[in-house]
Amino acid sequence: MKHLYLLFIVLSCVATAQTFEGISAPASRTVTLAADEAAFTITVAATLDSTQQQVKQALQNAGLPNPTVVATGLGQDVSPYFAGAVQMLYSATVALPAGSAIDTAKSLEALRTHLPAPLQSLQYAVAFNPSQTTVDAMRQVVMPQLLDDSRKLAQSLAAAAAVKLGAIRSISDSAGVYAILVPTAAFRAGDFSALQSGVLLGIPSPLPSSTQVTFSLNVVFATAP
């Protein structure tokens, strides 16, 4: 009875991995990469007659190189006592070397406390990630290893199903980055002084130096009787 149960499990696994095209053999590996890029996200509210170019110019004047700025909608300036005028809302993004994050945050803080017209409010946050160059370089290393893992898995499944493993029919790959964010308190206040001192609410908060990326590969192999 025990042997029949084990055989049922094996056949179920094979049936799950087999598709009408052949045998699907997924593989993945998680690696740790240097978080060498600081991705800033900036939210700006400005007067209704403002333009994207004016917002971009203000950010460039603050030292941010070529930020991408888009208008995201309309909002109302709300104070504890009354609702103010309708504002134009913008979102801006810029990616910089991680080592320049503190200097950039200082520039944004100076801009936030001395807003030029037509800007009326500004908030910002930063995520530390591996740069695309770093991810692409690791992909070149990991993908051959994943292909080998997929082939070994497919061979095992083919043997269990009593079929021969054929040529590769299709390959798809992906990479997922686990971003490291600056604490929420820093985003709400737009204040990175905690990072400058390395302490936030009494808890050490050093700048992140690494993060994890999962590379995945799915290979479909043809089969023959």
Image (spheres, rainbow, N blue to C red):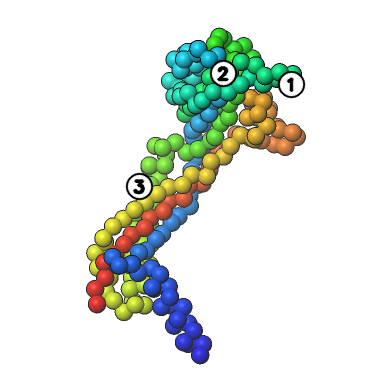
Element on which disc 2 rests = strand
Residue type, mark 3 in image: Gln
**Crowd class of label 3 (few under 14; some 14 to 19; many from 20; radius 10 Å):** few
Viewer-side label of 3, 2: 2
Q: Which residue is mark 3?
A: 140
x and y percentages locating residue 93 in the rendered image: 48, 27
- Sequence-earlier tag: 3 or 1: 1
Residue 58 versus residue 217: which sits nearer the camera? 58
Residue nearer the viewer, 144 or 215 = 215
| Left or right of 112 in this view: 219 | left
Circles 2 and 1: CB distance less than 8 Å? no
Give the residue number, with chain letter if any, for mark 1.
80
Q: Position of residue 86 (x, y in %)?
A: 58, 18
Image height of 153 relative to 162, above or below: above
Labels 2 and 1: the sequence-earlier one: 1
Mark 1: give few (<14), some (14-19) or many (20+) Cα within 10 Å. few
Identify the residue at image location x=38%, y=68%.
Answer: 17
Q: Position of residue 53 (x, y in %)?
A: 44, 15
52 to the left or right of 166: right
Measured in 3D between alpha carbons, the distance from the residue under mark 2 to the one under mark 1, in whole angstroms, is 17 Å
Check whether the beta carbons of the residues at disc 3 and disc 1 lie within 8 A of each other. no
Disc 2 residue type (three-letter): Gln
How far is the residue under mark 3 from the one under mark 1?
55 Å
Q: CA distance from mark 3 to mark 2?
A: 47 Å
- Whether residue 9 appears in this view of the structure is yes
Q: Is residue 196 visible?
A: no
Residue for badge 2:
87
Image position of 63 with respect to 200: above or below? above
* Residue at x-position 46% and y-position 15%: 51
Q: Which mark is residue 62?
A: none
Left or right, 206 with reference to 156 = right
